[in-house]
Amino acid sequence: MSTRAHEVYDVVGIGFGPSNLSLAISLDEHRENVPAHPATAVFFERQPAFGWHRNMLLPSATMQISFLKDLATFRNPVSRFGYVSYLHESGRLARFVNNMDFFPTRLEFHQYLEWAAAGFTDRVHYGHDVTSVRLAPDGADGRPGHLVVEARDTTTGAVRQVLTRNVAISTGLVPRMPDGMERDERVWHSSEFLAKYRRMNPRDLTSVAVVGAGQSAAEITRFLYDSLPHAQVSAIFPSYGYSIADDTPFANQIFDPAAVDDYYYGTDQARESFWRYHKNTNYSVVDADVIRDLYRRSYAEDVDGTQRLHFLNMTRVREVKRAGDETRVLLDTLLDGHTQELDVDAIVFATGYDSMEPSRLLGELDRYCLRDAAGRHRVERDNRLLAPELPFGIYIQGGTEHTHGLSSALLSNIAVRSGEIADSVLATRPAREPAARREHAAAAR
């Protein structure tokens, strides 16, 4: 076990996706502005390298937010980590402008994220799984002074412990499968789609199905139809048709930074109205161009007198039976109440995600964190769990839809949110850290 008692960071980030990457950028820019007293941070990421929804980087799939809602611009328009800086360094700025599109492909945006993450290799331990966060031994006043974060190297099994004044948890969303459905080599969740698809011989996929009515489901359906010209493709969803995502300007204000304050400080009635009127900006909805693409393909089949794209609307999956390479799907048709069977070579459940829940990771620390009447964590405006007895901060990036609104799990506000977290962390740290301790922290990175 590797333990360095002198490492005391201002913040340790658990997870290094876009949210904590944005936090790293915010802290780095503080370092540039206050070089005499730089913020110190280290991050642990379970993946062996940076990656963000790699299994949904489908050809032609585009972002659903403007490129200006990047890692830094809304907080600091002149940041060297903005999307425009990436385009300039990549030699594509002029061509991007000529393209006249606010919405880059998901692949290009991922390349931007990798470019930004490459600037922090000295502060990120990839291939490390954080196994516990606990109180350090009591300080001179009898109160806990720091947190101990323990991480295990997923390759060697070696364990590293670091001390920190704060943690920022951003472990991402958790893939959701319907009750009773188990993933295997023929039953996939959309979060693993490309990896599982590429393991298959396309010739062996003669009948495939996609479950879900949201953006990922529609994109995967389109991808399979285009990539497997010999295959029957079935889209299974409980609604009568795909619902369009409302991306009109007034509705899009729901993702503005100011809307977070309106939600956080609003009444219960106001919060309920946010969800009732504006859930269709993001949840179980599909971009209009994807809907039209699928309809055009279906219409072309009508004209040709062929059919291999099937829309099983008002339908739910009751059961998936597996026997060897055979997969039989039992479907309940909501229109007439009948049950039908569908044999497929693979089925993809694009059935969404559950929010991040930090309780398991926090262990005994979770008892210090207050909860509301519904049993959910109470979260302060700066994204810190409300824990009055603790003299340090437990910040969460995600899992705060009930306190911070619809944008909590999305990219729209990460630049501003990371700045708020950085400001909160730095406002509560000691005025000056002993030089020897700073040197230890720098050496550990």
Image (tube, grey):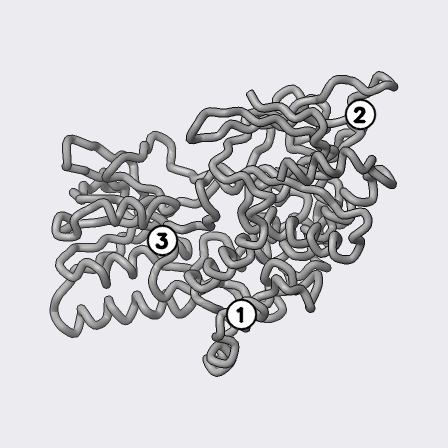
The C terminus, quarter of image = top right
Q: Nearer the viewer, residue 58 or 289?
A: 58
Residue 116 as seen in the image, left or right of residue 415: left
Q: Is residue 321 above or below residue 402?
A: above
Q: Amino acid at mark 1?
A: Glu
Of the two numbered discs 2 and 3 on the same chain, state the one appearing first in sequence: 3
- The residue that appears at 54% across and 53% down in the rendered structure is 117
**How far apart are the two marked residues, 2 and 1, measured between alpha carbons?**
47 Å
Residue 303 as seen in the image, left or right of residue 366: left
Q: Residues within 10 Å of mark 2 (few under 14, many from 20)?
A: few
> Of circles 3 and 1, which is in front?
1
> For numbered disc 1, what is the local secondary structure?
helix
The residue under label 2 is 389
> For numbered disc 3, what is the local secondary structure?
helix
> Of circles 2 and 1, which is in front?
1
Q: Is residue 330 above or below residue 253?
A: above
In the rendered image, is residue 377 in sight? Answer: yes
Locate residue 264, reporting x and y percent: 73, 48
> For numbered disc 2, what is the local secondary structure?
loop
Residue 217: numbered disc: 3
The residue under label 1 is 89
Of the two numbered discs 2 and 1 on the same chain, state the one appearing first in sequence: 1
The image quadrant that residue 285 belongs to is bottom left
Q: Amino acid at mark 3?
A: Ala
**How far apart are the two marked residues, 3 and 1, measured between alpha carbons?**
34 Å
- The residue that appears at 60% across and 44% down in the rendered structure is 123
Q: Amino acid at mark 2?
A: Glu
Residue 153: numbered disc: none
- The residue that appears at 50% across and 61% down in the rendered structure is 112
The N terminus, quarter of image = top right
Q: Is residue 258 above or below residue 397?
A: below
